[in-house]
Amino acid sequence: MTITKASDLVMIDRRVTLKWLMGAMAAGQLAACGDAAKGVTWAEMEAIKAKGYGTDPDFNNTAAPWPLTMTQAELVAASGLADIILPAEGDYLAPSKLGVPAFINEWVSAPYPDQHKDRVLIINGLAWLDQESRTRFGAIFASAEAAAQKTLLDEIAFKDKVKPGLEKSAEFFNRFRSLTLGAYYTTPEGWTEIGYIGNQPGTGDYPGPTPEAAAHIKGVIEGMGMKYTAP
């Protein structure tokens, strides 16, 4: 189903999205994803003044200390874009069906410097998508024809093929893509898709890495100019 209005959005428990966000911030991974994570400016926005979790989040207490800030129109645009970046396939659900736009809402609403930079980038970028789509195709981005969506994204999605004048839009797309993938693959469904099973108990002697993994490790180590010693 194409997300074209607020009633189409799949809502999930906010505690779930907060746990995703807390885990991502604790790991520091999503904040560093993508070439455009730092130093990007667009139309400025006032920083969110709400209380944050501090430096030691309590994963057993997921009460939300800050308000969500994305509008319904922005969530619709985010859902449409996320589902293009990572479309549903077979048994694998689209990001909008797993609450990924809700995670992005939590992320850009959080009162921290890195999240504020992302908020400026993403909210401006979503507005640009809808404005450009209306101007060129007569519809908001999420409800435009697939060919129209592709035409627009082809101008900003590929690092070496960005249309002149759309550098900021390209930075937005790159960052949004990183957040979409990071959120999707921290869901149980995303884990299943990539075959991640987490820590599992083992018995007997440790068998060591597979030949393929050992060959990869050897190549990386030797590529750094160091000597590789087989286990």
Image (cartoon, rainbow, N blue to C red):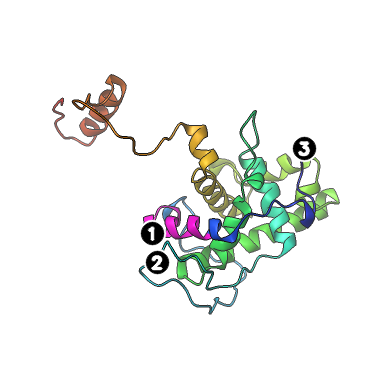
Q: Which residue is mark 1?
A: 26
Report, in whole angstroms, how far the alpha carbon at label 1 lies from the one at label 2: 8 Å
| Contact? badges 1 and 2 (CB < 8 Å) | yes
Q: Secondary structure at mark 2?
A: loop
In the image, is residue 22 part of the stretch drawn in magenta?
A: yes
Residue at point 62%, 41% (across, down): 85
Judging depth in this view, the residue of 99 and 174 nearest the camera is 99
Q: Position of residue 168 (x, y in %)?
A: 59, 57
Relative to residue 93, is residue 129 depicted above or below? below
Q: Secondary structure at mark 1?
A: helix
Q: Which residue is mark 3?
A: 147
Q: Amino acid at mark 1?
A: Ala
Q: Which residue is mark 2?
A: 57
In the image, is residue 1 part of the stretch drawn in magenta?
A: no
Q: Amino acid at mark 2?
A: Pro
Q: Amino acid at mark 3?
A: Ala
Query: Which quarter of the rendered picture does the N terminus lie within?
Result: top right
Report, in whole angstroms, how far the alpha carbon at label 2 lies from the one at label 3: 44 Å
